[in-house]
Image (cartoon, grey):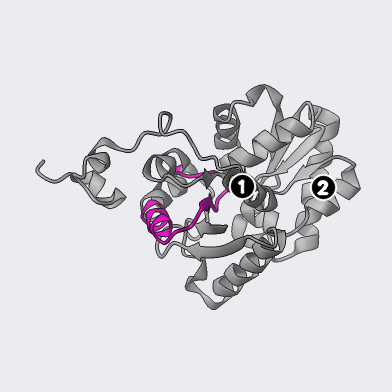
Amino acid sequence: MRIVYVVPGPMGSTPEGKAELERRGRLLREFASPETEVDIIDVAQGPASIESMYEEYISIPATAELMMEMEAQGYDAAILGCFGDPGLDAMRELLTMPVVGPGEASFLTAAMLGHQFSVITIMQSVVAPTRWQVRKAGVGEKLASVRSIDVPVLELARDREATLERMIAEGRKAMEEDGADVLVLGCMTMGFLMVAEDMSKALGIPVVNPSRVSLKVAEMLVGARLTHSKRAYMTPPKLAIGKVKGSGELLVAKGE
């Protein structure tokens, strides 16, 4: 099977970003089963990092266009490479191959692993959106809390050990003060720091890595020959009848 991980922003626009893109690609291939081919690609335009709803929204149009291109190239599934799952519903409307949102996949996995889970995320600016995201996934009753370490995305990897210490500290508070028995890493950069195992060892509870889980869910869906319901995620009418050819043209339909 062929799976593509789409980063909704221009990560590879700098030498450092290109190296990070390649590193994440290597990790994804390590996560994957031997028969799975995994590619990673970034969008040419958009926010350098996503730390607000505004940045999520402006990332969606270019990501949707690239997702459609990837399906046309024959990929079996796609992963929307941001924990906030920006535009996930829209991607599923546009595509027939499975599209996995790491946030949604992580919440549903955490809900299976314990009675209550907490999300450890980056900034206070994404705490409220993450709470809504959990409710939208249908597991709001299992959410114990959303806690932030107050470190921007682009600074998480500068001092891995300091970041890990903050995450463990907030994870411990989530357990002792909020009643969490499972934790979720609420950022893809956190996931690719490979700290979930360290946190789980320090705290003694499961810690869900969205980078790994989203790939395994994509593999499962393809292997089970399942994709999202087109009754739930209907193809946009203008696109369905051929009035427009791509997501960009949906803004101005022909003849209108």
Image quadrant where residue 89 sits: top left
Is residue 234 placed above or below 11 in the rendered structure? above
Q: Residues within 10 Å of mark 1 (few under 14, many from 20)?
A: few
Q: Amino acid at mark 2?
A: Ile
Q: Are marks 1 and 2 in contact (CB under 8 Å)?
A: no
Which element type, helix, strand or loop, lies under badge 1? helix
Looking at the rendered structure, the secondary structure element under dot 2 is helix
Q: Is residue 21 left or right of residue 256?
A: right
Q: Nearer the viewer, residue 98 or 59?
A: 98
Q: Percent x, y for residue 107?
A: 66, 36
Instruction: Judge whether 19 appears above or below 157 on screen.
Output: below
x, y percent for residue 72: 38, 58
Q: Give the vertical position of 177 relative to 104 (above or below).
A: above
- The residue type indicated by label 1 comes to Gly
Tell me if residue 69 is in the magenta stretch.
yes
Q: CA distance from mark 1 to mark 2?
A: 35 Å
**Quarter of the figure that contains the N terminus:** bottom right
Q: Which residues are magenta?
A: 64-87
**Residue marked by disc 1:** 223
Mark 1, mark 2: which one is toward the viewer? 1
Report the residue at 47% width, 56% height from top: 8
Percent x, y for residue 126? 57, 41
Decide which of 254, 97 is in the foreground and name it: 97
- Among all residues in the image, which is located at the extreme left? 255
- Which residue has dot 2 on it? 168
Q: Which residue is at 77% across, 48% downward?
A: 167
Q: Residue at x 40, y 49 (%)?
A: 60
Along the line of sight, the residue nearer the viewer: 217 or 221: 221
Label located before the other in sequence (1 or 2): 2
Q: Residue furthest bottom?
A: 15
Q: Is residue 54 left or right of residue 85?
A: left
